[in-house]
Amino acid sequence: MLLQGIDIHGMNLLLDPKIFNYVILILYALNVIRWIFAGSWTDAMYWVGAFWITAVVTFGYER
């Protein structure tokens, strides 16, 4: 099946909802770096906040 995915330690990488959060965390971190280089600390702090909220949801809850 196409959506079978890759199993690592019993976790299917394509079907695990936390994988989406990991991708989003990486994108948020890249946005922080981008806005720091652009000189906008306000925008960088916005993305830091988004990063922390997503990190708490991803790692703070056992689901």
Image: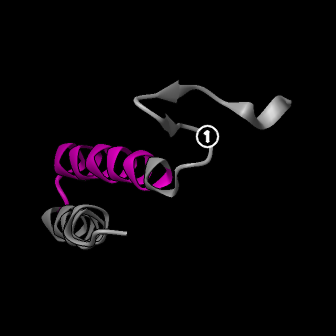
1 on left or right of 30: right
Q: Is residue 32 magenta?
A: yes
Residue 1 to residue 25: above or below: above
Check disc 1 and give the amino acid type: Leu
Residue 34, by quadrant, is top left
How far from the left and from the top, in percent, is residue 60?
A: 20, 70
Residue 14, by quadrant, is top right
Q: Is residue 16 magenta?
A: no
Q: Residue at x 25, y 73 (%)?
A: 53
Q: Nearer the viewer, residue 17 or 27?
A: 17
Element assignment for label 1 = loop
Magenta-colored segment: predominant secondary structure: helix
53 on left or right of 11: left
For the magenta stretch, what is the residue range?
20-40
**Quadrant (top left, top right, bottom left, bottom right) of the N terminus:** top right
Around disc 1, counting alpha carbons within 10 Å, would you say few (fewer than 14), some (14 to 19), or many (20 or more)? some
Residue 30, by quadrant, is top left
Q: Residue at x 44, y 45 (%)?
A: 23
How far from the left and from the top, in percent, is residue 2?
A: 84, 30
Q: Residue at x 17, y 49 (%)?
A: 36
**Quadrant (top left, top right, bottom left, bottom right) of the C terminus:** bottom left
Residue 37 to residue 35: above or below: above
Q: Nearer the viewer, residue 11 or 14?
A: 11
Which residue is tagged 1? Answer: 14
Q: Residue at x 19, y 43 (%)?
A: 37
Residue 41 to residue 3: above or below: below
Residue 9 to residue 22: above or below: above
